[in-house]
Amino acid sequence: MFVDSHCHIEDEEVLKRAFDAGVRVLLNAGNDLDDNMVALEFAKKYKNVWASVGVHPDNVLDKLDKIKVEDIIKASLDDNVVAIGECGLDYHYGSDFKDEQREMFLRHIEASGKTGLPIMIHHREAENDMVDMLKDGIKKYPNLKGVIHCFTST
């Protein structure tokens, strides 16, 4: 059985092709809370399609003043949501707004820790900050768990 543990499906034809190709389970990750609702609609409509909720680091500047920890937690309460994210740090494309990315990632760590849902992490060229933030997160939330789907380090 094939599982796509991280996809961005917004088109039923793409979903059909995935199923026809033998993919049996998909985790549809939204890029911000607006996209998350599209992912959630697919999860509600199709068996074996699940959703995650979060804000991708590329979208942080547009969402930092709008999305709080409580918003992420509230969006995660649907039974079809199985993870927090896609979230993290991307210093390759976002080197000019690192502080904002760190702040938003802390919100996702807190949401994951409080809900017990795993966190889906996007990481690019931010090794030291990522490791430090996750170590601190595990100290505060010992149940913190997840997956790093994008990783550019050694």
Image: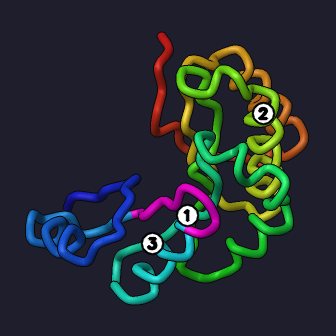
User: In the rendered structure, are the residues bearing label 1 and label 2 in contact, judged by CB atoms less than 8 Å apart?
Assistant: no
Crowdedness near tag 2: few (<14), some (14–19) or many (≥20) residues, C-alpha within 10 Å: some
Cα separation between marks 1 and 2: 20 Å
Q: In this view, does 3 lie above or below 10?
A: above
Question: Measuring 70% from the left and 22% from the top, which residue is drawn there?
Answer: 96
Is residue 111 rendered to the left or right of residue 19? right
Q: Is residue 20 above or below residue 5?
A: below
Q: Earlier in the sequence, mark 2 or mark 3?
A: 3
Magenta residues? 27-34
- Label 1 sits on residue: 52
Cα separation between marks 2 and 3: 26 Å
Crowdedness near tag 3: few (<14), some (14–19) or many (≥20) residues, C-alpha within 10 Å: many
Q: Which disc, if any, is residue 43? A: none
Tag 1's secondary structure?
A: strand
- Label 3 sits on residue: 50
Residue 84 at x, y percent in the picture: 64, 58
Question: Measuring 84% from the left and 46% from the top, which residue is drawn there?
Answer: 141
Q: Which disc, if any, is residue 102? A: 2
**Is the N terminus in the top left, top right, bottom left or bottom right quadrant?**
bottom left
